[in-house]
Amino acid sequence: MDRFMQVAVEEAEKGILSDEGGPFGSVVVKDGEIVGRGHNQVVLLKDPTCHGEMQAIRNACRRLGTFDLSGCVLYTTGEPCQMCLTACLWARLDKVYYGCTIADNAAIGFRDQKFDELFSGRDKLGDYLQELDRDACLQLFARYNGLKKKTNY
């Protein structure tokens, strides 16, 4: 497994084991170093915007002292929802690597597919989004799905 995706999986596991949110962990990488990390904390913070990608972007921006993440890439366990994808574009991330697909997210109870159909347009992004280590992330999703959890966010 890619070393940065492994850290994203570990971030997700940290969140699901403490029942903070769904199986979504992310890291922001610049020049081969992790500059931001985060996992889904929707349940913990009672805030629907606290997806793993959003938390990693916020963390990277604070650490780097900027809102412009040009030169950075994001690794995340699940294909970003429309909110997170737009945040990636606003933050000027160069690329996004994701594990599980939007359909995989839906298969474990998340609503990403509904919003993806409503807002569509991923096909216009070219190679901005790239699947990576899906099998490992599917194993993470299966572990999450087997846990008793508060809600799917």
Image: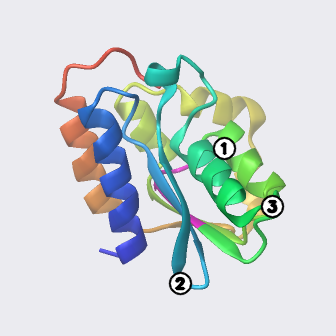
The stretch in magenta equals: 74-79
- Residue 39 position by quadrant: top left
> Dot 1: what SS?
helix
Q: CA distance from mark 2 to mark 1?
A: 22 Å
Mark 2 against mark 1, which lies toward the viewer?
2
Residue 3 in the image, given as x and y percentages of width and height = 36, 76
Q: Which residue is mark 1?
A: 84
> Dot 2: what SS?
loop
Determine if the magenta segment contains residue 78. Answer: yes
Q: Which residue is mark 3?
A: 66
Report whether 117 appears left or right of 108.
Answer: right
- The residue type indicated by label 1 comes to Cys
Q: Name the N-terminal-most of marks 1 and 3.
A: 3
- The residue type indicated by label 2 comes to Gly
Q: Is residue 111 visible?
A: yes
Q: Which residue is mark 2?
A: 32
Q: How is the image coloured?
A: rainbow
Q: CA distance from mark 3 to mark 2?
A: 18 Å
